[in-house]
Image (cartoon, rainbow, N blue to C red):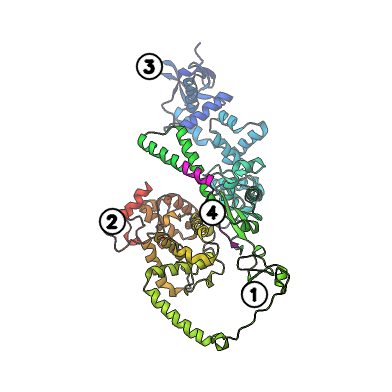
Amino acid sequence: MTPTVEHGTTAFIPLNKLKKHPKNARRTPHTEASIEAKAASIATKGILQNLVVEPETNAEGEPTGFYLVSIGEGRRQAQLLRVKRKQIKKTEPIRCVIDTANDAAEISLDENVTREDLHPADQFERFRELSEDRGWGAEEIAARFGVTTHVVKQRMRLGAVSPKLLQVYRDGELTLDQLMAFAITDDHARQEHVYENLSYNRDPSIIRRDMTKMNVAATDRRAVFVGAQAYAEVGGNIIRDLFTEDRGGFFEDPALLDGLAIEKLERIAAEVQQAEGWKWTAAYLDFPHAHGMRRAYPHPVELSEEDATAYDAAQDELERLTAESDDADIDLPPEVDARFAELEAEIERIDAKRHAYDPDEIARGGVFVVVAHDGETRIERGFIRAEDEAPEPETAEDGETIIDGVRVNGDGEIIDGDEQDGEGRDGSANEPELEEDAGDDGKPLPDSLIRDLTAHRTLGLRLALGEQPDMALIAVVHALAAQTFYRGGSTAHCLEISPTSNYLPAHADGIEDTAAAKMLNDRHAGWAADMPRDVADLWGFVAGLDHASLMALLAHCASLTVNAVKLPWEQNKRRAHETADKLATAVTLDMTAHWTPTVRAYFGRVTKAHILAAVRDALGDEAAERIADKKKVEMAEAAEQLLAGTGWLPPVLRTGRPTWLTDQQTDAFPVEAAPEAQNDDHFAIAAE
């Protein structure tokens, strides 16, 4: 049956009889996303708006049996997509309105010009209402409208913004980007508070920062330590920013997060105390640097015969497997890899027994359990409170030692009470020794003479020590180690060398919780564990070290005295800072291993000009120009991402190239070149 062609009538025309009208106003094709959305909508709701068509005629003016679509070309293409997916047949009847009176070009243009799109705010609210009123999830809504689930979630989140702010958006006083920033949470009170307190700078990044100021980023060490799953299991909500990369979101309840972290730390602390027997343990989110306690370190101990045998056996098997795997030159079977891991764990377990705390130190001391900089557990042992310190021994007039009022002999044995009261062990009275008349020889030497003689001895020591460099090295290391590792060590040496160490946390907040600080602390703890318990035995320990160990101990003690901090009021230290630069060059200091330019560490604390200079320095003019128009906060964030992995450092952290370095040696020298000697190609290659 041929459909009627009378103007204004409605007809159902087979899809394969419809064509795009050559006078259609739209020259730019519909996007794939648009066709997908229309197809999904038609599949669930049918064609809600009729197509407008006119009969096609040939050159003689006779009907061809086809119809040209003046209005509704997108819907026609959506149906063709459904045919391709075998959802409908190509002969599917399409409801159309016949138009033979109007100009096709005009009505096609009119449909697109006079139509007013739904305001985005209305769209956002309607999506939210579909979810709330009909109970549809984001997946179902996405399927019915032919958009992605993520887009639906974004629109629903925007529709959940405070009605007051949505009205501000409708009035044109907020941009969509700003509204997206407010939508990071659905807390209307928080949104309105932040809006009311905005300054002239309404950059979306500023809004996001203020909206999440009370929350904790998922990258924070506390969040890493607790974990998203544990936080969510107790009802904690993680805020996800659907419009930007949020790196895991934000933990909404800092108090809950801190409580979970403390609970976990306390459980770990209890396990350590039970396993190791310390008098006390304390759990902290941050290490209490100002604790004021003395710290004891483990001391070397001999392995038991059983452990020594097991260690040798594990070491021998590991060496054999290593040699076999090197010869085989193939991927190792899983069981061999597993055996490697077992042997390495066994060796590590036995090695840990080579050092142990004195039982008395464990009985008096305690442990701090804190969250490390990387979100792992940090356990610091051996801290002795002042009230738990062993009493300092007193010396009696006869040279014997008194501890807590009890007299002990030179072997540390307690002298019984009767003996102390003047009676011997056999009950008889102690006869007082008769003083011999020593005459003038028994009188002490005059103080002035002792000063005179010891001054001459000091002069002799200075002369002799200056002629024996090896012994001078031992004496210097002894003096430094005595003051570095022992309480009261300043009186245990005769060289007037006093190491001082600038307290760096006073200049850089959080510096003691960095990876570099941990490396330094671990090195210090390693040396402390090897030190003799009594400072009186330190000379023998230092003198007995081989040359390499002696130099290593000297280097460690000297390193703790380095001070290259620049303070604005210390103008007279210019030469000291120049020396620090020379020292950095001499030790080939590479600060890229210890410091990274981030928003927090650098870009958020300098001007826009400095940020652009950094990007230009690292990546060239083109990269700097790409971010030149951004707001300060956005520019800082962009610079952090652009410079990640490039090895860029601000000039104050760069190490100059040694003057002795030849051109041929340049490639072998791993240190950042001085600003004037930098090669731009280095940064370009790194950026790639």
Identified by mark 4, the residue type is: Val
The residue beneath circle 4 is 301
Q: Residue 616 colored magenta?
A: no
Q: Of callouts 2 and 3, which one flags the residue occurring earlier in the amino acid sequence?
A: 3
Identified by mark 3, the residue type is: Glu
Identified by mark 2, the residue type is: Gln
The 10 Å Cα crowd at callout 1, few under 14, some 14 to 19, many 20 or more, is few
Give, as a single range, the part of the protein colored magenta: 293-314
Is 204 placed above or below 6 here?
below
Identified by mark 1, the residue type is: Ala
The 10 Å Cα crowd at callout 3, few under 14, some 14 to 19, many 20 or more, is few
Point 50% across, 29% down: residue? 36
- Left or right of 295? Residue 432 is right
Q: Of callouts 3 and 1, which one flags the residue occurring earlier in the amino acid sequence?
A: 3
Residue 41, disc: none
The 10 Å Cα crowd at callout 2, few under 14, some 14 to 19, many 20 or more, is few
Whether tag 1 and tag 2 are in contact, CB under 8 A, the answer is no
- Between the residue at mark 1 and the residue at mark 2, the CA separation in whole angstroms equals 67 Å
For label 3, the SS is loop
Residue 396, disc: 1
Q: Is residue 99 visible?
A: no
Q: Quadrant of residue 237?
A: top right
Is 105 placed above or below 621 here?
above
Q: Quadrant of residue 543?
A: bottom left
Whether tag 4 and tag 3 are in contact, CB under 8 A, the answer is no
Residue 242 point in image, percent of width and height: 55, 42
Q: Is residue 141 visible?
A: yes
Disc 4 vs disc 1: which is toward the camera? 1
Residue 665, disc: 2
Disc 2 vs disc 3: which is toward the camera? 2
Q: Of callouts 4 and 2, which one flags the residue occurring earlier in the amino acid sequence?
A: 4
Residue 60, disc: 3
